[in-house]
Image (cartoon, rainbow, N blue to C red):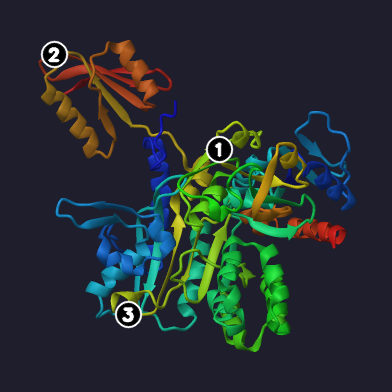
Amino acid sequence: MLKIAVPKGVLFNPSIKLLQNSGYKIPSEFGRKLLIEDSNQQLSLVIVRPFDMPLYVEEGVVDAAFIGKDVIEETSMSCFEILDLGYGQCRLSVAVPSYSPYKSVDDFHSLVKVGSKYQNLSKKFFIERGIQVRIFPLGGSVELSPIVGLSDAIIDLVSTGNTLKANNLIEIETILHSTCRLVVNDAKYRLKRKEIGEFILRVVEVIK
Amino acid sequence: MDKSFSGSVELLPEEFLCRSKIEDKIKRFWKKNGFVMIAAPVLENWDKLQVALDEKLIEKTIRFIDRFGKVSVLSPDLTVSIARMVSARKKSGPFPLKYFYSSDVFRVTSEHSVIRQCGVEIIGADKNTLADVELAVLIFMTLKEIGFNEIYLEIGNFEILKKLLDLDIIKHYRKVLFDSFLKKDWVTLNYISNEIKDPKISNFIKNLPSLTGTPDEVFSRIELIPDFLLPAFKNLERISFEIKSAGVKHYINLSLINEISYYTGFIFQVFVPGSPNSIGGGGRYDDLYSLFNFNCPSSGFAIDLDKVYEILKTNYLKPINVDVLLCFNDGIPLHWVWNLAASYRDQGIKVEMDLRSRDFNEALEFSKNKRAKRMVYILKLESSGVSGWIVDTLSGNRERMTFC
């Protein structure tokens, strides 16, 4: 039986739907269960927070996972990135308050203060641009940080842009485009090659 | 509170004994295969070593300045240290040299920074496939020898990717392609393949992730291989044939790559159940020695002993016990105790002397805790020697004895 990690949040429903469309008998209602098996006992699903997924995959606790490209890049996780599943489209962007004097990243000078959940990507982005930066690691409500004066800018995921608009923030640069990916653990890709190969084929049939 | 410093693996006596048993078994096996042990230098002069270290490895090194102001480095890669050593001292051969080592290497990682490695080096064999075959077979057999039943040996030829990346039509994508191979990012690879104009090359890149599997599955798809890559492909096929002839089951992966940059051709990795990633691997690095001004083909592999230990420890972990625990009352002249211990040891019996004052019952309890098979408790000095009890700690049976 393959063990697959599915992320909580926006990628959860489309991932479950993809599995159901791939022929796996996954129930539609789970309640608060975090471990689910399909009724044919081909798959065991583990429901995990997105930023915990790399650990589960790299340690081989699960064989494969559905995971956002943003998390893959932020954590530099080591795995096989097999398929772009197409859903969960969003972008990691730099945003500032609409009244900010900064209209583009090139306008930043001296030490920029940035609030973000994506500390590594944020740091890398500013270092590559030669801009000194101080990253404030935030767990949530990132949009709040420039409004209350904690930071000059934020780096966060944007899908429709409604949350930014509602908080009077504007995007000034996109760092990364992200969609949901199918990833497979390094060793399991080899040791369970037949089962994983069949699983990939079933998923490909649905997304192509 | 976290009581352990994660810089190195800590091993208590039972654990150390367990890892040593595995290590000894590996060493014995390699000796049987004609390899001789080498003491690889752990502390190196930075100036001398850095010429052969790539950027990624340099980032992970542990360096410090000694009191003379010179930079020293704890060896992050014994293959490089041995290359430096052989280039300086063993240029005259006789070749090929077949060495093995078992030592610590030092790399700053998110886990342990001291990694126990066992590895072999074949230095100065001809640039034919024989050394490659021997290495692949040897790593497989070594893992079997220490108790692994299911071993996934994967082989590839790094020359295929190198030649592909050297193409002029690839030059705009070189870095991103290389990173995609390194990160096993088939999604980006697929995007890039769509942008490459040459249909044969584009199709080859698109299909590379699927060029993995059994030798039959991969070598039957020769129509996908561009002409300029055929010699490297055929070379891999020859090696695979020889490995198969040695009775070793293996798999092919044409996009296999190692993050250490000195590999030039044949490469391989091994996977076993219980480890989420590779536990060992190696290959050919024909250009490495020339960085130390010595043109000499070479190849080798290393096994991560700590990873192996983690998987196999349940098979090897045994309590340490002594045959006899020697306890004695206060007032017994020490030379009697020494002599008695020596006479046991002369008979090949493992003896430990208790260094605390205990009465008989306390000593018996201590012997049981120490898993001693027998306890000798010396009670008093007699005219003819010393007297006491010999106790079987398991049954509790005791016998009065006089030791002369």
Q: Nearer the viewer, mark 1 or mark 3?
A: 1
CA distance separating discs 1 and 3: 64 Å
Q: Which residue is mark 2?
A: B331
Instruction: Tell me the element at label 2.
Output: loop
Q: Which mark is residue A151?
A: 1
Mark sitting on residue B95: 3
Quarter of the image for the C terminus of chain B: give it: top left
Badge 3 density bin: few <14, some 14–19, many ≥20, Cα 10 Å: some
Most foreground residue, B21 or B109 = B109
User: Would you place residue B188 above or below residue B404 in this image?
Assistant: below
Instruction: From this view, report whether residue A142 is shown above or below residue B229.
Output: above
Q: Position of residue B50 (x, y in %)?
A: 32, 65
Image: A19 above or below B404: below
Going by the numbered disc 3, the residue's amino acid type is Phe
Of the residues tagged 2 and 1, which is closer to the observer? 1
Does label 3 or label 2 sit earlier along the sequence?
3
Amino acid under label 2? Gly
Q: Secondary structure at mark 1?
A: loop
Residue found 51% across the figure and 69% down from its top: B136
Residue A181, picture quadrant: bottom right
Foreground label between 3 and 2:
3
> Distance from label 3 to label 2 (Cα)?
65 Å
Q: Is residue B234 visible?
A: no
Position of residue B244 in the picture relative to residue A170 (left or right): left
Would you say the residues marked 2 and 1 are in contact, meaning their CB atoms lie under 8 Å apart? Answer: no
